[in-house]
Amino acid sequence: MASTILKRTSFSSSSGIRIGGVSLRYFATKVEAGTDIVATAHNVSLQKARSWDEGVSSSFSTTPLKDIFKDKRVVIFGLPGAYTGVCSQQHVPSYKNNIDKFRAEKVDSVICVAVNDPYVMNAWAEKIQAKDAIEFYGDFDGSFHKSLGLEKDLSAALLGPRSQRWSAFVVDGKVKVLNVEENPSDFKVSGAEVILKQM
């Protein structure tokens, strides 16, 4: 199985690779193919999308990363935020529309994560009718993305600290494939169609 990673070093870097005829510059992250994602973000938990009442009844519980990744084949993708354009119109639909193909590849779960609270993630997942196919998690304080070096300051768009747009294939906590877009507004390498080919 081939492992692939696009790494960010700087926006001014001229080095890069080509995928599908698209030239991409490298991006520097704290994670790469072979990295144990649970160990890299060892003190981090995510918050499963839910209503406020469900949050109260669960005592605002969180989900440790080992519960998400251990002994599982997981496709996870991160995006700048719920209700934003590319995220709602392209990124999530690409995974929702290919869910049967992921199941055929014996993927245990397809996960969407963003720097949002779990209540916003829940409302958004319901609005775009993707909750039955995809698991949604909030990274409310951005600690998951910071641990992986995938954070991005989007204050210029009035979003504040958010995440890069990215995707990964993770087996038993180990990253097999990681794709990071050059810009969060891009949708060239992080979609479902790309990662399905890489699997």
Image (cartoon, rainbow, N blue to C red):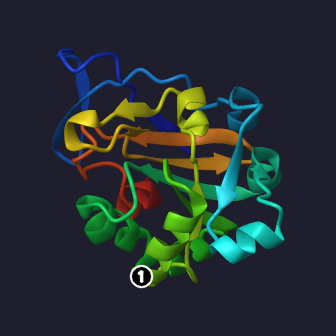
Residue 194 at x, y = what percent? 37, 56
Q: Which of 91 and 119 is in front in this view?
A: 119
In depth, the one of 86 and 198 nearer the eye is 86
Instruction: Give the residue displayed 32% in from the left and 68% down from the top.
Output: 88
Residue highlighted by disc 1: 127
| Residue 199 can be seen, yes or no | no
Name above or below for residue 138 compared with residue 22.
below
| Mark 1 residue type | Lys
Return the x and y of residue 89 as percentages of the image width and height.
26, 70
Residue 144 shown left or right of residue 159 in the figure: right
Residue nearer the viewer, 4 or 9: 9
Kindly indicate the quadrant of the structure image that contains residue 11.
top left
The answer to whether residue 54 is above or below residue 48 is below
- Asked if one can make out residue 175 in the rendered structure from this viewpoint, the answer is yes
> Mark 1 packing: few (<14 Cα in 10 Å), some, or many (20+)?
few
Q: Residue at x 41, y 20 (%)?
A: 28
State the count of labels.
Answer: 1
Spot occupied by residue 78 in the image (x, y as percentages of width and height) = 46, 50
Question: In the figure, residue 173 lies in which quadrant?
Answer: top right
Q: Quick one: SS at disc 1? A: helix
Q: Nearer the viewer, residue 146 or 5?
A: 146
Residue at 35 percent across and 38 percent down: it is 160
Give residue 62's position: percent from left, percent from top: 76, 54
Q: Quadrant of residue 74?
A: bottom right
- In the drawing, does residue 66 fall left or right of residue 10? right
- Report the residue at 69% width, 31% height from top: 41
